[in-house]
Structure formats: C-alpha cells, structure tokens
Image (cartoon, rainbow, N blue to C red):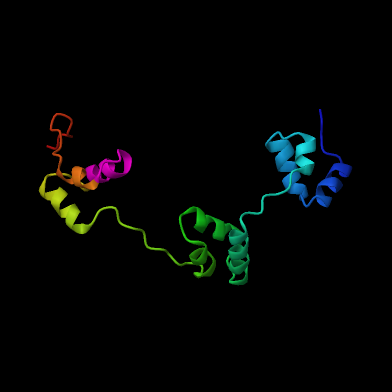
C-alpha cells in the first residue's frame, strides 16, 4: 500500500501544502501522490481574499466569513458585521398574503409547502383551494 513519507511531507510543505491538507487529499479524497504534493491550494478570488483579511482584522474567523458568504451575505457584510449579527431574511410571503391564504382555507403549513417545496408562485399558492379529497380529516 502506498503512503506519504516524511520526504513527501517536506515536498508538500515547500509547495505551500500543510501536512493536514496533504493527508486529507491523499487518504480521504484518494488523490494520487503527485497530485497531492503539487496541486496548489485554492486561495479564492482577489476580492474574496481581501475581504477575508478584513474579516480577520475585525475578529471574524475564516470559517464564519466563508459561511456568511455561502449563505448569501455580500463580502462587505460578511467581513464587517460583528459576530452575533443576524441578517434579516427576505420574506417570501407577506402578512397580507398569509391573511388571504387563511381566508381561503389554506393553512400556513400548506402554504409553506406549496411555496418552498413545490416551488409554486405565491399568488397561486394563496388562491388555489385545498383538494378536499387529500385533506387530513379533523374530528
């Protein structure tokens, strides 16, 4: 069985690849030894790297920064808003639309299922009546 030798780790280190990263590439992902030791790490776009450094200066870890970006925050928001900041979500359904759905006999659960899971447009989801044949019986 092939393994990474101490000399391999030295080659990786010279190429800017940490021991942990080399182990992950070789043993977990099954990369070839050559690819493991020579493929440079991805650093991200220049703008991403710039804002990641700003985030670190602001006391925001790399993990938190990249998680924020993955969740749709802008680089500016992800690197500057303090830890614990909750970015308000855009509401898919307004209070008025909830009221219309309720008036039409459509429960909140059904409405969310139609919009989020089935990808119905909100206007259709709040107006199409419930199919009584499949509705849950409440007695």
Q: How many marks?
A: 0
Q: Which residues are magenta?
A: 109-121
In this picture, is 86 found above or below 32? Answer: below
Q: Quick check: is 74 in the magenta stretch?
A: no
Q: Quick check: is 117 in the magenta stretch?
A: yes
Image coordinates for residue 68, horizontal then vertical, percent:
50, 58
Describe residue 6's horizontal placement relative to residue 112 as left or right: right
Residue at the spot 58% in from the left edge and 65% down from the top edge: 51
Describe residue 3's horizontal placement relative to residue 84 as left or right: right
Residue at the spot 74% in from the left edge and 43% down from the top edge: 39
Query: In which quadrant of the rendered image does the N terminus lie?
Result: top right
Describe residue 74's horizontal placement relative to residue 124 as left or right: right
Determine the residue located farthest toward the front in the rendered image. Answer: 46
Image coordinates for residue 85, horizontal then vertical, percent:
45, 67
Q: Quadrant of residue 49?
A: bottom right
Residue at the spot 30% in from the left edge and 38% down from the top edge: 118
In this picture, is 33 found above or below 58? Answer: above
Residue at the spot 81% in from the left edge and 47% down from the top edge: 12
Front position in the image: 32 or 102: 32
Q: Quadrant of residue 58?
A: bottom right
Front position in the image: 134 or 11: 11
For the stretch drawn in magenta, the main secondary structure is: helix
Describe residue 93's horizontal placement relative to residue 75 as left or right: left
Image coordinates for residue 44, horizontal then vertical, percent:
62, 54
Image coordinates for residue 27, horizontal then vertical, percent:
73, 36
Front position in the image: 139 or 31: 31
């Amino acid at each position: 069985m092939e393994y990474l030798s101490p000399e391999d780790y030295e080659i990786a280190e010279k190429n800017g690849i940490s021991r942990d990263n080399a182990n992950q590439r070789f043993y977990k992902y099954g990369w070839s030894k050559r690819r493991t030791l020579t493929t440079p790490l991805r650093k991200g776009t220049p703008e991403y790297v710039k804002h990641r450094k700003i985030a670190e200066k602001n006391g925001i870890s790399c993990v938190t920064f990249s998680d924020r970006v993955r969740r749709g925050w802008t680089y500016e928001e992800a690197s500057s808003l303090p830890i614990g900041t909750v970015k308000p979500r855009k509401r898919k359904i307004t209070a008025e639309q909830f009221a219309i759905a309720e008036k039409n006999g459509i429960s909140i659960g059904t409405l969310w299922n139609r919009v989020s899971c089935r990808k119905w447009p909100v206007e259709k989801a709040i107006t199409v009546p419930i199919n009584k044949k499949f509705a849950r019986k409440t007695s």
